[in-house]
Image: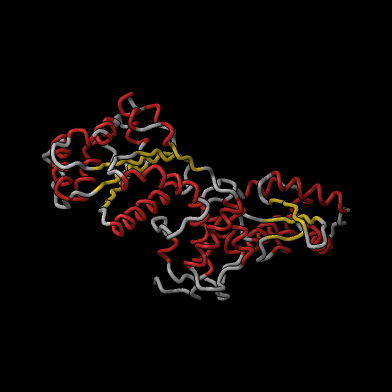
């Protein structure tokens, strides 16, 4: 049942997982550099440090912190300075007890989940750390959930964890990750540890950055030559509306899986459109029905001319428009009116247009159909347009 594939495109599906963290994260070099600067004293002096990482969904916050922690452990091993890290997802562990238990089980996997208070577990954790003599980095991902659950006191307790140590000095550093700015919700004592200047912001990815991310991930996950360059371009164009790398990778994943159901054995723009429609499509039957006959004919011409390409020039679509008009017994409108129809359709979100320079120094307008397979759209329109 699960091996019913017509072709194989995906070489390593794990590389398309949200949990996969590449060895190098492109376009997050500045944030990585800031983290290294902030946490250098952990190695130099054995000090505890903190950082607050913030940005909207899909901007690489968690992946960057995971990569940074893995790099810290590797560097520490090379220098003979043991460093460990624990990542707690506060959406899943949204109470103080659950957070501490997750950290404690890093050192004692068999620790029971009931029967111990938070102070008791913290004392146990302190004893285990003093015995291991390692430096620990605690990452609280989606830390804003703790604020919403009124469980923020654990941040204070962990930030002051070192102060009650009676044995050998230990180092417990913290990184908070949140989509929202939450430092204002900390009390004065906690805020004195989490310096506002230790905030690292992650902006939304730009279109060209997403293009790089998708291209690199395709190289890692797919067999060579199995995805067209304009399909990668289309994924970047669609994802740039949100600046979300997770959305882009999900779109790549589903596009590749759609491609494996086809005979041609490659990912084209048509598979990307199918995947986008599967995830979220703005094209509805109502939107198509609301178009008058002239607009439907223009959109049909665009759907037929674009086929499995990511973009089509207005010139090419206008030539197809003349053929479609003849098929349906209509008089083709002049270029100015055709262009007006195109812009009207763009306002509905069904198509997009962009102007690009060419080798001769001229400017060419391209039309894209991001939300629905051209074949499906053509079939829908053909059933709606009266002969």
x, y (%) of residue 85?
A: 29, 49
* Residue 274 horizontal side relative to residue 109, left or right: right
Q: Quadrant of residue 263?
A: bottom right
x, y (%) of residue 138?
A: 29, 44
x, y (%) of residue 200?
A: 45, 40
* Residue 191 horizontal side relative to residue 294, left or right: left
The answer to which of 284 and 173 lies nearer the viewer is 173
Q: Quadrant of residue 95?
A: top left
Q: Identify whether 272 is placed above or below 100.
A: below
The answer to which of 109 and 330 lies nearer the viewer is 109
The answer to which of 323 and 370 lies nearer the viewer is 370
The answer to which of 245 and 370 lies nearer the viewer is 245
Q: In the image, what residue occupies the spot 45% across and 44% down? A: 34
- The quarter of the picture where the N terminus appears is bottom left
Q: In the image, what residue occupies the spot 68% across and 65% down? A: 307
* Residue 197 horizontal side relative to residue 297, left or right: left
């Amino acid at each position: 049942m699960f091996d019913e594939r017509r072709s194989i495109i995906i070489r390593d599906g794990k590389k398309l997982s949200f949990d996969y963290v590449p060895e190098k994260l492109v376009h997050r070099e500045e944030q990585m550099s800031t983290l290294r600067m902030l946490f250098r004293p952990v190695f130099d002096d054995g000090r505890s440090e903190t950082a607050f990482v913030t940005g909207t969904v899909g901007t690489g916050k968690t992946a960057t912190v995971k990569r940074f922690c893995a790099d810290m452990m590797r560097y520490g091993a090379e220098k003979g300075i043991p460093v460990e890290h624990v990542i707690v997802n506060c959406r899943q562990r949204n109470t103080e007890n659950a957070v501490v238990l997750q950290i404690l089980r890093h050192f004692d996997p068999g620790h029971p989940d009931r029967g111990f208070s938070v102070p008791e577990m913290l004392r146990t954790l302190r004893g285990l750390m003093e015995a291991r003599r390692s430096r620990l980095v605690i990452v609280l991902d989606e830390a804003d959930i703790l604020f919403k659950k009124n469980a923020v006191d654990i941040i204070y307790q962990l930030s002051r964890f070192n102060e009650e140590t009676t044995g050998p000095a230990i180092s417990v550093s913290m990184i908070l990750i949140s989509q929202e700015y939450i430092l204002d919700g900390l009390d004065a004592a906690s805020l004195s540890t989490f310096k506002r200047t230790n905030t690292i912001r992650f902006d939304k990815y730009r279109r060209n950055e997403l293009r790089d991310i998708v291209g690199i991930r395709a190289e890692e996950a797919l067999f060579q030559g199995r995805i067209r360059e304009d399909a990668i371009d289309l994924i970047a164009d669609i994802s740039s509306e949100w600046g979300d790398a997770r959305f882009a990778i999900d779109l790549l994943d589903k596009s590749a899986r759609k491609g494996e159901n086809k005979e041609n054995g490659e990912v084209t723009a048509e598979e990307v459109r199918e995947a986008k429609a599967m995830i979220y499509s703005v094209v509805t039957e109502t939107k198509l029905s609301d178009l008058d006959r002239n607009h439907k004919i223009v959109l049909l011409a665009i759907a037929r001319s674009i086929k499995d390409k990511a973009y089509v020039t207005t010139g090419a679509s206008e030539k197809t428009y003349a053929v479609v008009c003849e098929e349906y017994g209509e008089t083709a409108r002049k270029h100015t009116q055709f262009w007006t129809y195109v812009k009207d359709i763009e306002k509905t979100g069904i198509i997009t247009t962009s102007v690009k320079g060419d080798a001769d120094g001229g400017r060419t307008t391209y039309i894209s159909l991001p939300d629905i397979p051209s074949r499906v759209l053509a079939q829908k329109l053909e059933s709606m347009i009266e002969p």
